[in-house]
Image (cartoon, coloured by chain):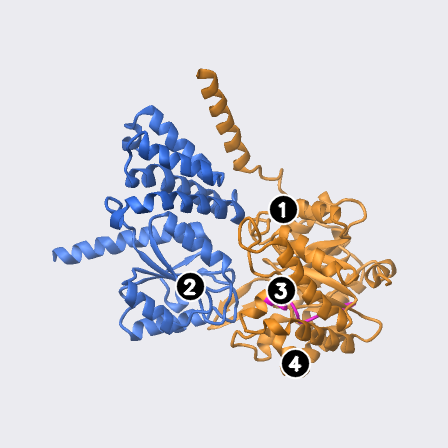
Chain colours: A orange, B blue
């Protein structure tokens, strides 16, 4: 099988992804908390229109409406028996809209479960669930699998094992929403180095906070990335704000255009957006990326002096000293 | 730590400090071993062990989690160690005699939302801090919250939402509390990634909790105020 993702990256210095699916579906009326993946069969025209919006905005690939399409997430909606069907439908619709020239990324999100030893889910069970989802996406015609919004490396490992059963290329993004780490404490440097060791080429960050925070995350990744890694970023369109009883995101299309430029300046080659973004945001990003790069780049964040040293290490050292002192005393 | 703690024999102080460290590092077996030693060798009561060893240790874990030094995995491992030690103490704690129960919390992720991890972390940390926690799980509707509050005579309601589409349901629950005449009985804490201070205020919650450590701090502080109010009322 040809690796259409690498082929695209060889052809284009900058590849633009697409924008939000979930918040677009909410705007289109998915407000009752039911499974977005079900809309691939109940409201295919809505899903198709969202895909089309991103194609028209100039995205080089579009991402399937299958983020929560694993059996653990779908089980909460009593849809766990329809994993293959819903993922295939998500992919088939995207393929239809993307046509032969644009690529289709098969979205694979977290299970929402904790893996051993923190929780009950084993690596093997998780990998099997991811393989089931990936098989549906492959059957619907995706060009690569996009494992996204992960917070635990253990879960990425399981998702990689599952996704690779399809033989398709795989890209991975994690979400650094907790003090520039993932919820599970993974740093951008750890992510880029570990994933590279596991044979992933396209690695990055998505969702989390806003463009400013993701800029710092991508800066850290750029500092730490091994040679050959292609960086990817998909920022939310700012942060959600609660105004007059409604949620809105504060990142305008011009804000996202500037974010795209800043990503390019950092050497990020796959640039897209996440929650709160719309085709209008992506069109603004496209226009910016088609124009000249920034003349000079100044970080929008405060450059950290050194990475924070965990207090755990200090405490361990103190305890070890305590213990050895005690032993000597005996 | 405190004058009471300083008055303990040096060897016992060291045992407690080591228990706190073991808890911090999520070393379940060591924490259980320390608990047994405190009981058997030093004749400590469960209340003392909780106060000086386990709850004190979880306070440090909570502070470092709040400050971004520890992350979810470490906190979960510490909570598991705490739980294992509690299993040792529970048979000895007849109705938590000698241990002042902080209060009763009903907690759940609101209707339409299925996110579990953060809410469970809050539940575990609250248990660690001495609260009785009734965890209703995910996708909880207003009726279920109301029923549990009545059944357990809860002091605190904790609601979680991870989606911008489900967070408005918190307002529905609070409105139901008002209708049912329960609003003054319970402290309402809300949390979840998309929430903000302004949102919590807008829907009439008592406190927005950025993370589990803040939730525990808020629960403790607001309970204190509530108990004080109750005391004043009973005197009047």
Query: Are the residues tagged 4 and 3 within 8 Å (C-beta)?
Result: no
Closest to the observer: B35 or B14? B35
Q: Residue B108 carries which label?
A: 2
Q: Which mark is residue A187?
A: 1
Nearer-N-terminus badge (3/1): 1
Q: Where is residue B92 in the image (x, y as percent from the top left)?
A: 29, 44
Q: Mark 3 points at which residue?
A: A237
Q: Mark 4 lies on which chain?
A: A
Q: Which chain carries label 3?
A: A
Choose mark 2 or mark 3, whichever is in front: 2
The secondary structure type at the circle numbered 3 is loop
Point out the stretch of residues depicted in magenta.
A60-71
Q: Position of residue A221 (x, y in %)?
A: 70, 47
Q: Same chain, marks 3 and 1?
A: yes
Q: Would residue B111 be found to the left or right of residue A115 on screen?
A: left
The secondary structure type at the circle numbered 2 is strand
């Amino acid at each position: 099988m040809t690796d259409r993702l690498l082929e695209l990256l060889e052809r284009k210095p900058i590849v633009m992804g697409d924008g939000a699916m979930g918040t677009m579906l909410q705007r289109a009326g998915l407000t009752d908390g039911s499974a977005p993946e079900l809309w691939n069969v109940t409201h295919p025209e809505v899903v198709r229109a969202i895909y089309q919006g991103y194609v028209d905005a100039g995205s080089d690939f579009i991402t399937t409406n299958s983020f929560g399409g694993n059996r653990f997430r779908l089980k909460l909606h009593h849809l766990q028996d329809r994993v293959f069907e819903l993922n295939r439908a998500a992919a088939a619709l995207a393929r239809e809209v993307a046509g032969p020239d644009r690529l289709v990324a098969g979205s694979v999100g977290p299970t929402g479960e904790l893996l051993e030893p923190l929780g009950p889910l084993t690596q093997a069970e998780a990998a099997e669930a991811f393989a089931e989802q990936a098989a549906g996406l492959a059957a619907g015609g995706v060009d690569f699998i996009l494992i996204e919004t992960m917070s635990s490396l253990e879960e990425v490992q399981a998702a990689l094992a599952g996704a690779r059963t399809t033989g398709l290329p795989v890209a991975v993004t994690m979400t650094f929403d907790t003090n520039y780490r993932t919820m599970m404490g993974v740093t951008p440097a750890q992510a880029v180095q570990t994933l590279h060791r596991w044979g992933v080429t396209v690695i990055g960050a998505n969702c989390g906070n806003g463009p400013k925070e993701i800029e710092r995350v991508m800066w850290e990744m750029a500092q730490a990335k091994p040679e050959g890694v292609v960086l990817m970023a998909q920022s939310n369109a700012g942060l959600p704000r609660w105004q007059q009883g409604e949620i809105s995101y504060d990142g305008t299309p011009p804000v996202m255009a500037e974010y795209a430029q800043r990503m390019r300046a950092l050497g990020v080659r796959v640039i897209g957006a996440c929650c709160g973004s719309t085709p209008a945001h992506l069109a603004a990003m496209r226009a910016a990326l088609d124009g000249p790069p920034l003349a000079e780049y100044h970080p929008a964040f405060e450059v950290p002096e050194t990475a924070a040293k965990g207090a755990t290490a200090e405490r361990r050292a103190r305890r070890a000293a305590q213990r050895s002192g005690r032993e000597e005393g005996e | 730590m405190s004058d009471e703690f300083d008055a303990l024999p040096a060897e016992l102080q060291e045992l407690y400090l080591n228990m706190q460290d073991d808890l911090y590092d999520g070393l379940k077996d060591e924490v259980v071993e320390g608990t047994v030693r405190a009981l058997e060798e030093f004749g400590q009561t469960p209340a003392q062990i909780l106060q000086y060893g386990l709850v004190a240790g979880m306070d440090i874990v909570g502070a470092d989690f709040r400050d971004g030094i520890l992350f979810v995995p470490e906190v979960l491992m510490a909570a598991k160690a705490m739980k294992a030690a509690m299993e040792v103490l529970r048979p000895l704690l007849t109705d938590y005699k000698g241990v002042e129960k902080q209060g009763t919390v009903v907690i759940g992720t609101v209707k339409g939302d299925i996110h579990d991890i953060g809410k469970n972390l809050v539940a575990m940390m609250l248990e660690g801090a001495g609260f009785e926690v009734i965890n209703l799980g995910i996708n909880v509707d207003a009726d279920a919250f109301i029923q549990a509050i009545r059944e357990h005579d809860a002091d605190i309601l904790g609601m979680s939402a991870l989606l911008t589409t489900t967070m408005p349901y918190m307002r529905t629950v609070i409105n139901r509390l008002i209708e049912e005449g329960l609003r003054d009985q319970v402290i309402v804490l809300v949390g979840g990634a998309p929430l903000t201070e302004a949102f919590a205020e807008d829907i009439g919650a008592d406190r927005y909790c950025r993370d589990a450590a803040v939730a525990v701090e808020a629960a403790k502080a607001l309970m204190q105020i509530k108990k004080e109010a109750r005391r004043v009322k009973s005197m009047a």
